[in-house]
Image (cartoon, rainbow, N blue to C red):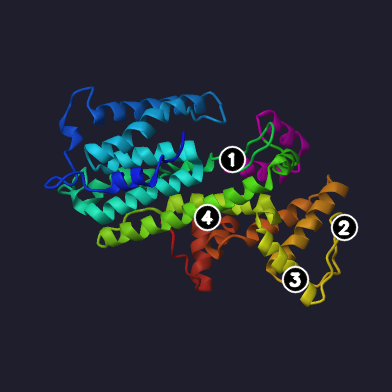
Amino acid sequence: MELFNSNEELSAMLAPLQEGEPVGQDLRENISPTSSYQVLRDARTLARNNERAALASGESMYFHMPDWTLILEKVPEVLKTESKDIELVAWYIEGLTRFHGFAGLATGFSIARQLIASFGEALYPRPDEDGIATQLAPLIGLNGFGSEGALIAPIKSIPITQGDYPGPLATWECEQAFELARITDPDKREARLKQGGVSREALDQVVAQTSTEFLQKMHADISAAIYEFELFQQQIDAYCPNDPQPTGKIKEALKACLQTFQYIAGDRIQSEASEAEAMQEQEETGGQAAAESQVNLNAKIVDRQHALKLLREVADFFRKTEPHSPISYSVEQTIRWSSLPLTELIKELIPEESARKKYQNLSGMSMSGQD
């Protein structure tokens, strides 16, 4: 199923319906079981119930795509011909994320942002005595108001590799592989593997089977999703400046996906132009390219990315020559930490909130930006 048949279709979803009634009617007023709202609500409920059942039975790939097909087909038509409705857009974002991954998520939040910018409080559901928060609740529910919202797990379940079994792998599976690699007790490690955990060796093999073209497109898709979601956040902040809405969990999930992806993809996500520039820079500074099969510790470090590349080579060396040693995993953990913002790094290094607040008070470091 294509994301859109044409740009005209997207424009029609964002355009006013008709003169005098630019946002159409509130579909909730029609309680017939065959009304568009009731049909779509039932389809979404069925899809989510089936996913919960799949998760309860231990399935890792729990998306059942046919359950979301009706939403992906019908919501655009309703937005074009019947009603401009935020709740329908929220369901649409859920379906787009499952079918089209990060590209779908970016498109969905772009639609939400533009509708809010164009129609504001006229959108359905209308604000009530509790204000704009009621109107935005379906969208904010994707993020969550305290606990994780409806979109967090699907984001981390988007495959970020190709590859044979156990691939393709999603962010959460890669994160579990990192955790499993840090387990030094062989019995505990084996138990985790029997429970369906992915080993670091299997992860590396899956990434090796993934084409460079796929990795570069995935990098672009994740980056575009973060960009579009940040624009959505800005629109929400401007729309209700006196009633801030939580949106940080989705952004954190997207950033986690990007960091994990960048780590496993390494240098393969660099464009040919970037690689050429890096090689030219090394030549100009007198650096000598290392053979692929060697760890060239004598090379002059050109920049941060070059330093991280050398560290990856060190980790690969120890993983191949001393697989029993924790050295490779420690180096890899350091590389992963290097991509984290300082606030995220502190949260990981100091998981206990009270201890983290004490450190914050002692150091004077700001932990702003958290929802």
Q: CA distance from mark 1 to mark 2?
A: 30 Å
Looking at the picture, tell me which residue is in the foreground, 7 or 278.
Answer: 7
Q: Is residue 85 left or right of residue 178?
A: left
Label 2 residue SS = loop
- Residue placed under numbered mark 1 in the picture: 170
- Residue placed under numbered mark 4 in the picture: 223
Residue 208 in view here: yes
Q: Which image quadrant for residue 117?
A: bottom left
- Residue placed under numbered mark 3 in the picture: 280
Magenta stretch: helix, strand or loop mostly: helix
Residue type, mark 4 in image? Ser
Q: Which image quadrant for residue 159?
A: top right
Q: Which image quadrant for residue 214?
A: top right
Q: CA distance from mark 2 to mark 4?
A: 32 Å
Give yes or no for contact between labels 4 and 3 (Cβ–Cβ under 8 Å).
no
**Of marks 2 and 4, which one's residue comes earlier in the chain?**
4
Residue at 53 percent across and 66 percent down: it is 359
**Residue 247 place in picture, x, y as percent:** 39, 53
**Residue 4 place in picture, x, y as percent:** 41, 41
Residue type, mark 2 in image? Gln
- Residue placed under numbered mark 2 in the picture: 294
Q: Residues within 10 Å of mark 3 (few under 14, many from 20)?
A: few
Label 4 residue SS = helix
Q: Which residues are magenta?
A: 170-197
Q: Residues within 10 Å of mark 2 (few under 14, many from 20)?
A: few
Label 1 residue SS = loop
Q: Give yes or no for residue 194 being in the magenta stretch.
A: yes
Q: Which one is in front in this view, the residue at disc 4 or the one at disc 3?
A: 3
Q: CA distance from mark 4 to mark 3?
A: 26 Å
